[in-house]
């Protein structure tokens, strides 16, 4: 039996086949547009983070940050309270690079369990690069620390803050990946990516174990690492989508 005519005069069967072929193209264009937008955002954030780290690092290396660091230190020391002492001591203990790395491992393990092994590897990249980076850079700058709260000063060098670097790298990476996977809402991801690193970094300045520029440099380095992890995640998603498209048979002509 002949196909019934469509309002345009084309047989409806042919119209359906044309429509079925047009849909993948539309889907592909939408995917490319979304990927380009996400890629641009990741690259832009990574570039800004790199520039910020370079600027702070230059100021510290050239000993041009003393006025700013001194002003922040003076203000913080004038606003110390016992309740804040206790709060920030707990923050700095619970959110040191060790526990934060354990959080990243747990997040990666969940992705691995779901079969997202490349995504899991991208998440594990954050703590690995963060710890390696701040350990190496500390040795290069060899910046002495401030006196510390009650005279308690860690033995390592000051710039950049390991707590700030690790918290920004790990929290921003987990927030981005878990948001893209649909595990958390955009608002929750944004709050997690901003508030926890902000509190962790502030605790280091409040406890007088880091200069303010140590924390700013750590946040910048951590954000750069997170942007790298996000870039790898997006590339893996593009690869996965391409594999899915290649396995979907085209509609019969």
Image (cartoon, rainbow, N blue to C red):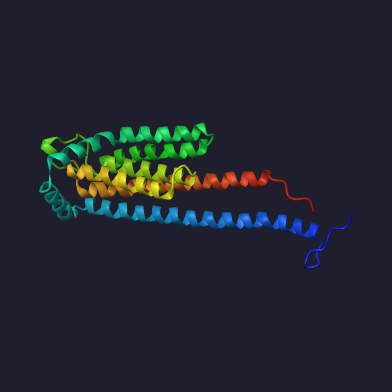
From the top left corner, tell me how far across and down residue 10 is, in percent: 80, 64
Number of marks in picture: 0
Q: Is residue 27 left or right of residue 19?
A: left
- Residue visible at 21% across and 49% down in the picture: 212
On screen, 190 above or below 120?
below
On screen, 59 above or below 133?
below
In this view of the protein, can residue 145 be seen by the observer? no
- Residue visible at 18% across and 41% down in the picture: 209
- For the residue pair 189 and 154, the one nearer the viewer reads as 189
Quadrant in the picture for the N terminus: bottom right
Q: Is residue 155 left or right of residue 165?
A: left
- Residue visible at 55% across and 58% down in the picture: 33
Q: Is residue 68 left or right of residue 162?
A: left
In this view of the protein, can residue 41 be seen by the observer? yes
From the top left corner, tell me how far across and down residue 172 is, in percent: 38, 45
From the top left corner, tell me how far across and down residue 225 is, in percent: 38, 45
- For the residue pair 48 and 90, the one nearer the viewer reads as 90
């Amino acid at each position: 039996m002949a196909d019934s005519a469509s309002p345009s005069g084309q047989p409806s069967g042919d119209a359906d086949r044309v429509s079925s072929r047009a849909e993948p193209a539309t889907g592909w264009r939408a995917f490319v547009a979304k990927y380009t937008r996400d890629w641009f955002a990741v690259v832009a954030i990574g570039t800004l983070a790199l520039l910020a780290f370079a600027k702070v690092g230059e100021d510290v290396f050239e000993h041009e940050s003393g006025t700013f660091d001194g002003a922040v230190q003076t203000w913080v020391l004038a606003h110390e309270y016992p309740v804040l002492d206790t709060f920030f001591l707990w923050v700095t203990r619970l959110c040191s690079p060790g526990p934060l790395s354990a959080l990243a491992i747990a997040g990666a393990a969940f992705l691995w369990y779901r079969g997202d092994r490349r995504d899991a590897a991208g998440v594990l990249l954050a703590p690995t690069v963060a710890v390696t980076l701040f350990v190496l850079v500390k040795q290069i700058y060899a910046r002495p620390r401030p006196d510390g709260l009650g005279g308690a000063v860690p033995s390592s060098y000051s710039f950049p803050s390991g707590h700030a670097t690790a918290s920004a790298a790990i929290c921003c990476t987990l927030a981005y990946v878990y948001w893209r996977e649909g595990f958390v809402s955009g608002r929750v991801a944004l709050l997690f990516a901003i508030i926890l690193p902000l509190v962790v970094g502030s605790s280091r300045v409040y406890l007088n174990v880091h200069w303010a520029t140590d924390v700013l440099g750590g946040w910048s380095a951590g954000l750069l690492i997170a942007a790298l992890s996000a870039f790898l995640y997006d590339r893996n998603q593009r690869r996965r989508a391409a594999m899915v498209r290649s396995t979907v048979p085209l509609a019969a002509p």
